[in-house]
Amino acid sequence: SKIVLATGNAGKVRELDAMLAPLKLHVVAQSEFDVPEVAETGTTFVENAIIKARHAARITGLPAIADDSGLVVDALGGAPGIYSARYSGEGATDAKNIDKLLAELQDVPMDARSARFICCLVYLRHADDPTPIICEGAWEGRIAREAFGEGGFGYDPVFYVPALAKTAAELSKEEKNAVSHRGQALKALLAKLGE
Ligand code: ITT
């Protein structure tokens, strides 16, 4: 039976696909269907993930998995948070978002640049499922002074992971999935789906 992956973000699809591919689940990308964008009107990751999963399940008639995620920076009071994708405003790109983040943190010393990626995954059996499966992951790091690495997507080039002495963009997809917020959330979701 098919499950629709309710995201238009190619970086998310690459990472989730890599972890889902070996399984018996038949996961299809939302791009295979005509799923129009839905307004992310929630104020939390979990609300926005539910909105996106419900929308995709409604349009496709299939069970859906949605990912709402973002970067929480302590020195910025938690920003960009749920607004991570659009941090630099209209026509935001990964590069513009990173530029804005580095500018905001210009005067913040290294020991005060702590941050974490958050990922909330929601699985809905159908659009009106009253008991969604909800799993979260968090990945601790700090914001580097400049971008390093070519891998990943989004804020990965400036997300420095002290334990690995690398930015997230310097990790292979497999290395990132083994420790990332998304990898943790998906591992938890798969465990619950298996129950
Ligand atoms: P969908 O809603 O279609 O899934 P989106 O990119 O709009 O795509 P979000 O609203 O969840 O998704 O925004 C998440 C943003 O957080 C994403 O665009 C990145 O800027 C950032 N982000 C999330 N996970 C990340 C990761 O693993 N590495 C780098 N940046 C990440």
Image: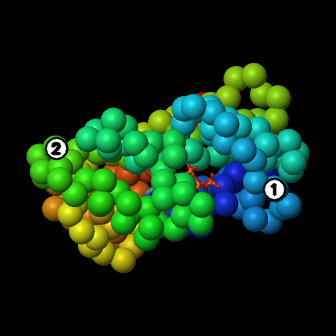
Circle 1 — which element? loop
Q: Which residue is mark 1?
A: 36
Q: Amino acid at mark 1?
A: Pro
Looking at the picture, how far across and down is residue 171, in whole percent?
31, 68
Q: Residue furthest bottom?
A: 150
- Distance from mark 2 CB to nearest ligand 1 atom below 8 Å: no
Looking at the picture, how far across and down is residue 184, in whole percent?
42, 44
Mark number, residue 112: 2
**Observer able to see residue 123:** no
Residue at horizontal 30%, vertical 75%? 149
Q: For the residues marked 2 and 1, what is the alpha-carbon distance in whole angstroms?
A: 40 Å
Pick the residue in front: 129 or 89: 89
Residue 180 is left or right of residue 47, and the answer is left
Looking at the picture, how far across and down is residue 176, in whole percent?
36, 60
Residue at horizontal 38%, vertical 60%? 100
Q: Amino acid at mark 2?
A: Ala
Q: Which tag, 2 or 1, sits closer to the chain's start?
A: 1
Circle 2 — which element? helix
- Distance from mark 1 CB to nearest ligand 1 atom below 8 Å: no
Residue 185 is left or right of residue 164, and the answer is right
Residue 105 is left or right of residue 80, and the answer is left
